[in-house]
Image (cartoon, helix red, strand yellow):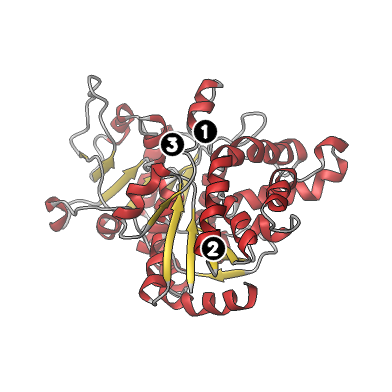
Amino acid sequence: MRVLFATHAERTHFYSMVPLAWALRTAGHEVYVASQPALVEDITRAGLTAVPVGEDHTFLRQLEEAGGQADFSGGFGQDGSVESPETWEGQGLLYRAFIDFYMRGVNNDTFVHGLVDFARRFRPDLVVWEPYTFAGPVAARAVGAAHARLVFSPDLLQQMRRTFLRLRDGAPEEQRTDPLEPWLGPLLERFGGGAFGEDVAVGQWTIDTVPAEARFPLDVRRVPMRYVPYGGPATVPAWLHEPPTRPRVCLTGGTTLREQAGHDGFPIGDLGMFDGLDIELVATLRQLPGREERVPANTRLVDFVPLPALLPSCRAIIHYGGGGTWNTALGAGVPQLLIANTWYALHKGRHLEGVGAGLYVSERAELRASLERLLDDPSFGESARRLRDERITTQPTPAEVVTTLEKLTADHR
């Protein structure tokens, strides 16, 4: 069958798709990945066939010009709080803003039109789209293809949407319409894709790599799939061939903020809080030119290291809750310490604490004490490995999911 993967130009979101794209390709299916031109090099470096469509989105530049910050995904909450309560003010209004500002921004008109044009030429049987690329279901509907979302993190957008739909009857009348409908409905009509329906919001089914206990309770059809890490081309450094002589801890700010804002989320100056601990801290942080700061003696500063190669030698990982890092650590069975300064990180941190596989803090100043607790108590490592063995590695691999996708595609196209 012909399979079209669709993603806006966000590298980490595309990376979550690569293992499934390769599983389908090695099973004999014809696979293309369509995105905005900015992502083409990453697609081809993954060994996949890229289809550049439309123009690059300018969301980040528009956000900066409006006086916002590049890490738009963080700090949900109308009053500046980390956690958005399930109220109209907390999530109903936020959902509307998220669709009108972010989703429309990254799914610009040229991208939607270009994706539909290519789909009409390629005639895919199946379109797989990441959860923020609503150009995907529009293109699938336009050509009568089956379509599915691929979710690699707890389904935050749809959780917000469910809150919106549940509470909108009590909102002012002009705010009650699901903002997806006035945006996507006219596009579907223009391209012959029929009327707006629930499948346009959530896919005909959802390929879900999130452990069951960490999912939001949403009424969507799920196809569980194991998360297989892919972080782009990488080289294992020579120092990683030798076993650590002290407990090794990874600290990473991820790559998304660095790419969007030009700096890491964790200040190098704050590494001093770990000074004196009997650990080897591997911090994937970058010194800013002309502003080199002191690094503690127990810290190895590296620009990048592939987490699947690093984490098996680690006793813990400290991070901000990004989907790729969180999933990779789950699969490695490593206790996690999350800096929960975003709504989604707080959700993941609570999940980890609930299953005994990690901790979370709301302030960086709390990290040292929490890390010492994580390293001193062996139950965290035992729980992290049990979670891996019972909940992660028992999920079907991308290769094992292919047959299910073939059947669902035949039923829905």
In the rendered structure, which amino acid carries the disc numbered 1?
Answer: Phe
Alpha-carbon span between mark 1 and mark 2 = 24 Å
Residue at 59% in and 60% down: 215
Q: Which residue is mark 1?
A: 59
From the image, which quarter does the C terminus lie in? bottom right
- Above or below 287: residue 17: below
In the rendered structure, which amino acid carries the disc numbered 3?
Answer: Glu
Q: Can see residue 315?
A: no
Label placed on residue 366: 3
Check disc 3 and report its element: helix, strand or loop.
Answer: helix
> In this image, 38 relative to 143: left or right?
left
Residue at 58% in and 50% down: 135
Nearest the eye: 302 or 249: 302
Q: Which residue is mark 2?
A: 127
> Tag 2 or tag 1, which sits nearer the N-term?
1
> Tag 3 or tag 1, which sits nearer the N-term?
1
Task: Determine contact: label 1, label 2, CB under 8 Å.
Answer: no
